[in-house]
Amino acid sequence: MKEKRYIFLLILIAVLLGPTHARNLEPTVEQALASLKPQHLGIGEIKLKSLSQQKGNRLVIVMNDEFSYLPFREELVKRAYDTVRSILPKNLRHKKLAIYAGGYEISRLIPFAENHKRFAVKCHRPIVEPVNRLYTPDRGLLNRHIALWQSHGFYFEQSLDRWEWQRARIFQTVEDLYTQSYVMPFLTPMLEQAGAYVFSPRERDTNGHELIADNDNPATYRETSAGKERWKEGGIGFAHRQQVYTDFQNPFTDGSFRQTHTTTDPHKEIRACWHATIPEGGRYAVYVAYHTVKNSTDDALYTVYHKGGKSQFHVNQTMGGGTWIYLGHFDFEGGREARIELSNLAREKGRTVTADAVKIGGGYGNIARRVNPSRIESNPTLAAIDYTDQSSGYPRFTEAARYWLQWAGFPASVYSPTQGENDYVDDYKCRGEWVNYLAGGSSVLPDSTGLNVPIDLAFAFHSDAGTTLNDSIIGSLGIYFTGKERKVYIHDVPRQVSRYLTDAVLSQVTDDIRRTYEPQWSRRGMWNKSYFEARVPEVPTMLLELLSHQNFADMRYGLDPRFRFVVARAVYKGILKFIAAQNGYDYTVQPLPVSHLRTEFTGANQIRLAWRAVTDSLEPTATPDRYIVYTRVGNGAFDAGTLVSDTTCTLTIRPDSIYSFRVTAVNRGGESFPSETLSLCRASNEKEVVLVINGFDRISGPDSFEVDTITAGFDTRKDFGVPYLCDINYIGEQYEFRRHIPWRDDDDPGFGASRADYETQVIAGNTFDYPYLHGRSIVRAGYSFVSTSNEAVAEQLVDPSRYRMADLILGKEKQVTMGRGTSGYAFKTFDRPLREAITRYCNGGGNLFVSGAYVGTDLWDNHEADTLGQQFANQVLHYTWRTGQASVSGRVKPAASPFARFGKLDFEYYHTPNAQCYAVESPDGIEPFGKGSYTIQRYGENNISAGIFYRGDTYSTCVLGYPFETIKSEVQRDALMNAILSTFNENSNDR
């Protein structure tokens, strides 16, 4: 409305002034076009550069670059022209009007216009293709290749003779790790589940173990033969002959590779087999290495044998030879052999298949650096120092791209453009060079040497620096480059397509953030600037500066995994829409995870699993049409899944085995992230069936605070937050909270400065898999169990009255908000529907076990007091809150009570960040309330009540102020669960 009134005023002025020359219109036109800028667009001042009458009856308006930063679409272009025409005097209205910005007529700035020349890429066989994929994402990113990297990384600074981060340690993270928390757990899987193959110039596995199996090491490699079919020597290849590698040493030239011909006859099948003993059970990435030769096969069949069975892949060996090619992450059992096989069976006989090496796990950096001789020559005083080669001592996933690329066999010209003189420069330059070497020889870069991969686009994920005086949000910036001398890609496609990519992604990111968590999120400019990462790649490229990691207001969002999911999904959607437009097909966005998951027994050996699809309010195409049910038996790994068309399925189980399930939604765009994991078990000699209710679905950032303009920060001692699965960017606590302290150096970064004692560690978060852990202890106590989500109980999709005993998992569930709190609060422990369901259950004679770190704090001392919730805790569950942050020792001991089974149970729970289980830094002190309720446990260092047991006339409850699943000892967990269920039984028999 304000814009319309403003334009009307300009029209009125133009009418009053009457006929005029073009130059007299300049202020009016400038103001009119500047009025088109949305309020949330933080792009600087829009100015008119020139307005001139030209030959051909043309009136040409040239605006500054800031005007080109507007997200132009057909509607906005039309408004711009209509606005100018409406204020032109009569003597100029007949002229042909053209408005330019950033060197282009503004209709050329529309990213998805039909008349644009497209960067279309055809690839019928991608570099890696799963053999038995259960869905075909033909409206997603099927057969697409994306070069994706996160900013910076640990590097060797020659001027200081030390390894260091490229950015400062601030707000509990460092940019070198922070952007990984978007790319590795969220963005990369989204792209892969849409069908893309994602290349990374940095290690993508956080596992500290690394195993190498190679044809040059007979202890890790063997071959089979069939008649005359044999493997034979191929040429120079990989060998792992050194613990560390120094300047320009290439492990891919230290050994050999093997080769043979493909066959279509199963009787002539021969295999190359790699094997290595897994030192510690867990999840490992698997990479393979081979060589591209003349007549290479495009469907080499690899099989990975792992804890969940086997997974097979066709690898197109016509591309990607001579480096590590990622196949996927797999679960392996500690102490057992991992096995990877390569077959010569193919769809076409007579082609060449090659076999070199296999890498399992991420490991630690093995590139050693030292001060370059040229630096010593230029400063003779350094000659007195005895410099030695130094490796980082850090996990490889923390290191900069320059070091991964050397370990991965890329030429020194790619990873070290400075020829070893400056690792910092090498790192930011090598990423663009890496893209071109990947694409070299392919259809997108046919005249260059490289790995022959047809790369569709390149994307660099950064966070920016800078603060605001009023602590407002700095927001998001996109950077691209359209070139100076060379302004086209292959087939004369204008480099302007990089602007279209930038606009698509930046628009999606800012729109989604504003619609979900922060309506005032700022969209900054789209800079057409000659940044090396944007300038060098010969494919459409965008550099995203998401937010300022140095600005507290930005990081109150940026440390929350929910925000990271939304941002990563927005980037994925922008990339998808760009590639679909460039290649002329309709896109579909992969669905959101399902909810309301629940299980039940329907017979002696029959179970029913049900769930609910989730509507994506941001994307109408993200509707599921089918689902995949993944199954795990015992402590194994999940299988490859079963495709189902409905939101329910019936399965047969074996007695005495714990079955676990998770569900994903699929459509033609791809596969969603998984649901929570639910488990069940039918015990042969069951005493009865226990209902396990999973109420712990919180993921969030750490607690934050601000005191006017004096102090602010993140308080992990009060609430560390809850990472999604695990945290790979936490470095240590913030220790500088004074806002006025400035940055002086990366070692003295001022406000926000943080410790470094956790920066090499992976911190456990919410695995959404705790019904299995609770259920295992339930089964050992002699009971069967089923499990359900708390939402299904609250909405009465599950009837708890069918079960005489229930176990409610609350973990670190607690009401939290994000940033300024405009999106409200989430993750309340006991919301009204759940309270009502529990009240009905207990009043009907149900016995309830509850454990969680905030069972009291969330009702008494969080956001605002919940009077009805407090009454529920007092009168139904029979406890009251005494204090939050009740213990820092992580120890619990028994208290004298009428319930003898608890009398000898003392144990430890995880209370500091670690890799095994999320930490409980602020457990609750809770006390008995009312007749029949007693303290059964106390915290070790202060005797504050840690748990209560209530025996009533019709039901019993047990409530713990710390989560059951965080108890370190499995034996102690079993003993405690047995004590709780046995006491429930005793009390029921007494009533």
Image (spheres, helix red, strand yellow):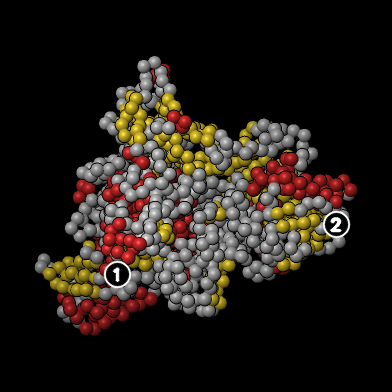
Residue 152: tell me if it is visible: no
Q: Nearer the viewer, residue 617 or 595?
A: 595
What is the x, y in percent for residue 322?
A: 33, 39
Question: Residue at coordinates 39% horizontally, 53% vertically from top-left?
Answer: 389
Question: Residue at coordinates 73% horizontally, 48% vertically from top-left?
Answer: 972
Residue farthest toward the top in the current orientation of the protein: 227
Q: Identify the disc placed on residue 790.
A: none
What is the x, y in percent for residue 43?
A: 34, 70
Dot in front, 1 or 2: 2
Q: Identify the disc placed on residue 66.
A: 1
Q: Identify the disc placed on residue 897.
A: 2
The quadrant holding residue 161 is bottom left
Residue farthest toward the left in the current orientation of the protein: 55
First in sequence: mark 1 vs mark 2: 1
Residue 134: tell me if it is visible: yes
Q: Secondary structure at mark 2?
A: loop
In the displayed structure, would residue 301 be above or below residue 16? above
Query: 10 Å neighbourhood of mark 1: few (<14), some, or many (≥20)?
Result: many
Number of dots carrying numbers = 2
**Side of 298 where 132 appears, left or right:** right
In the displayed structure, would residue 678 be above or below residue 176? above
Residue farthest toward the bottom in the current orientation of the protein: 16
Question: Residue at coordinates 85% horizontally, 51% vertically from top-left?
Answer: 900
Tag 1: amino acid: Glu
The quadrant holding residue 856 is bottom right
Residue farthest toward the front in the current orientation of the protein: 384
Quarter holding the N terminus is bottom left
What is the x, y in percent for residue 835?
A: 71, 58
Tag 2: amino acid: Ser
